[in-house]
Image (tube, grey):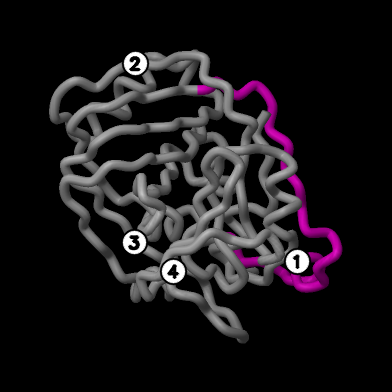
Amino acid sequence: MLYQHGTLGTLMAGLLDGTMKINEVLKHGDLGIGTLTGSDGEVIILDGVAYHADAQGNFKQLNGDEMTPFSTVTPFKPDNRFEVRHITDSDTLLDKAMYHAKSKNIFLAVKITGKFESVHVRMMPRQEKPYTKLIESAKQQPEYMYDQIEGTIVGFYAPQLFHGIAAGGFHLHFVDEKKTIGGHVLDFEMNHGEIEISNIETLEQHFPVNNQDFLETDVDYSTVHEDIKQSE
């Protein structure tokens, strides 16, 4: 099962208030991704522990009281796994992951563990009220390149049918083995390691029904799909 609080579409539209505690999110899964209030940086959930990488390059384990406007988690149980034995680019690896998946029309959870030749990440800078569309933050996001690093990439594949609820295609976050750096994955090249895939049959979509901005805002969705493509 995939549990998601909030949607990427409303996040892109500028509804950035945190509406659920990270501890509550962790009740629904042990692997996942997300962000914090104001779309502050990148949340990485691995082995039931939530970490946070911010736009200043800081990295820490979260205490659980932090609020999130958007998070996605699953109780990760791999259905398939395969080894990576030589240097391979991300497109080739993700295509191979899709080959091992049950279907391109369902959600997938992905865990990629090993040594990476390179990992290219970004961290979304935090906004303060009044919030703007997320694409404005994306234009100012810092990017980092890490070479010869061991760690884990976690995330999800969403069918294009659900683009807006989530990002159609793969949405991946990285954390290094020492738990000192991380971020939203823009690209990577793997040296060797393992890729695990979980086929997801059920999506539980939770909405922030106690947040007045979410309930009352007349969201302009006309550019959401394109904004997601540009920022993700």
Looking at the rendered structure, the kind of residue marked 3 is Arg
The residue singled out by tag 2 in the image is: 82
In-image side of 95 versus 1 (left or right) = left
- Magenta residues? 198-221
Residue 224 image position (x, y, % from top left): 52, 58
The residue mark sitting in front, 1 or 4, is: 4
Lateral position of residue 209 relative to residue 29, left or right: right
| Residue mark closest to the camera, 3 vs 4 | 4
The image position of residue 185, as x and y in percent, is 34, 50
Q: Residue 54 carries which label?
A: 4
- Look at the image and tell me in which quarter the C terminus lies: bottom left
Question: Quick one: label 2 or label 4, which is nearer the N terminus?
Answer: 4
The mark nearer the N terminus, 1 or 4, is 4
Report the residue marked by disc 1.
214
Depth check: give the residue in front, 173 or 182.
Answer: 182
Question: Marks 1/4: CA distance?
Answer: 25 Å
Asked if residue 44 shows in the view, the reply is: yes
